[in-house]
Amino acid sequence: MSFNQFPDQKIVTELLQRSLERNRLAHGYLFSGANMEELEAVARTLAKTLNCQNPPSRSAGGLAMDSCDQCDACRRIDASNHPDVLWVRPESKSRIISIEQMRDLMATVDLKPAVAEYKVAIIVGADRLKTEGANAFLKTLEEPPAKSVLILLTTERQRILETIVSRCLRLNFAGGGVRISPTNMAWLAEFGQSAAKAGGGLLGRYRLLGVLLKQLALQRAEIEKSLSANSPLERYDDLDPKMRDKMEDELSAAIEAEYRRQRSELMSALQWWLRDVWLQTLSSGAEMLCLPSLGATAQAVAHRISSADALENLQIIDGLQRSLQTNVQEALAIEVGLLKLKL
């Protein structure tokens, strides 16, 4: 993707391109917003632009203004196998970015770029940095090596140490209102129809639980299939055992991080629908609904519950979302949460 493919983030992309045009690129960036996928995509585009071999335009200072998406460097960065573009993600089991990960990153950043113009390090979920790792990273963030750019991504800016925040150029991405993917909208329509027919009993809630768990299982399977197919493990059979183990751990972490992101988006979509149910209990007009195309199912549920119950449903899902960000047992947490809902 190129910068012009982010119309909702025009302010951010124009600021980045002005920095490139004036040859005043920052050494450290903090991208914060509601959509991690979009933050990653913009960070990837910046990495491609800095190392593009055939950019569509250059500034007077010689820096590329955008990426071509076609050259070998752009393709390798898109495939996440460029030696000078480094990705750090929370470990799959602990869901933290450890001090060992940061030390490995800093040691690699200190080396000159292997084949590209710039070395770019992208830290996904920088709010998952433990205090020890964050403190160890401060020196590198204050005085990064020449021809290196550090990009921190977060959807929870408030959880990042101020000592880290103060050393970065902060770019806030627009939320863009309610945005639900077509896949999640289709699932939400199915969930709403099931809820409308459920009748509010325990058996009905168990059926809704099944609808949710089935979708989550499908999402995880698709993520595993997609990321495994793009992994270097599929292309190289003669990898050193230690390198293979490292790549397998990275793949597992990437799968878990992407699954958690997609799960959060699905639960957020459900929360928006439950908000419409609540609004319907208050007899709000259709113009107030976030998802008017699903208004009929929201109204069917609203007719049999009180506004207090509908508000409690929102609080339950909000608590479930927070719980799922920890190491809680997923299936049990979702079962307890869904069975508490009054539908």
Image (cartoon, rainbow, N blue to C red):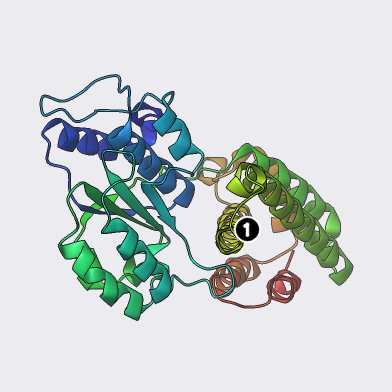
Quarter of the picture containing the N terminus is: top left
User: Is residue 27 visible in the rendered structure shown here?
Assistant: yes
Quarter occupied by residue 293: top right
Residue 188 rendering spot, x and y as whole percentages: 69, 48
Q: Could you tell me which residue is drawn at 63 percent across and 58 percent down?
A: 281
Q: Nearer the viewer, residue 147 or 213?
A: 147
- How many badges with numbers are in the image? 1
Quarter of the picture containing the C terminus is: bottom right
Q: Could you tell me which residue is drawn at 85 percent across and 53 percent down?
A: 197
Q: Secondary structure at mark 1?
A: helix
Residue 248 rendering spot, x and y as whole percentages: 61, 60
User: Is residue 200 visible in the rendered structure shown here?
Assistant: no
Amino acid on which disc 1 is placed: Thr
Left or right? Give the position of 47 relative to 212. left
Quarter occupied by residue 68: top left
Left or right? Give the position of 11 relative to 306. left
Name, please, the residue furthest toward the bottom.
132
Q: Nearer the viewer, residue 45 or 159?
A: 45
Left or right? Give the position of 293 relative to 70. right
Q: Could you tell me which residue is drawn at 81 percent across and 66 percent down?
A: 205
Residue 39 rendering spot, x and y as whole percentages: 40, 47
* Up-down relation of residue 171 to residue 328 (above or below): above
Q: Nearer the viewer, residue 278 or 176?
A: 176
Name, please, the residue furthest toward the right.
203
Q: Residues within 10 Å of mark 1 (few under 14, many from 20)?
A: many
Q: Which residue is mark 1?
A: 281
Residue 26 rendering spot, x and y as whole percentages: 17, 48
Left or right? Give the position of 145 relative to 261. left
* Up-down relation of residue 338 to residue 152 (above or below): below
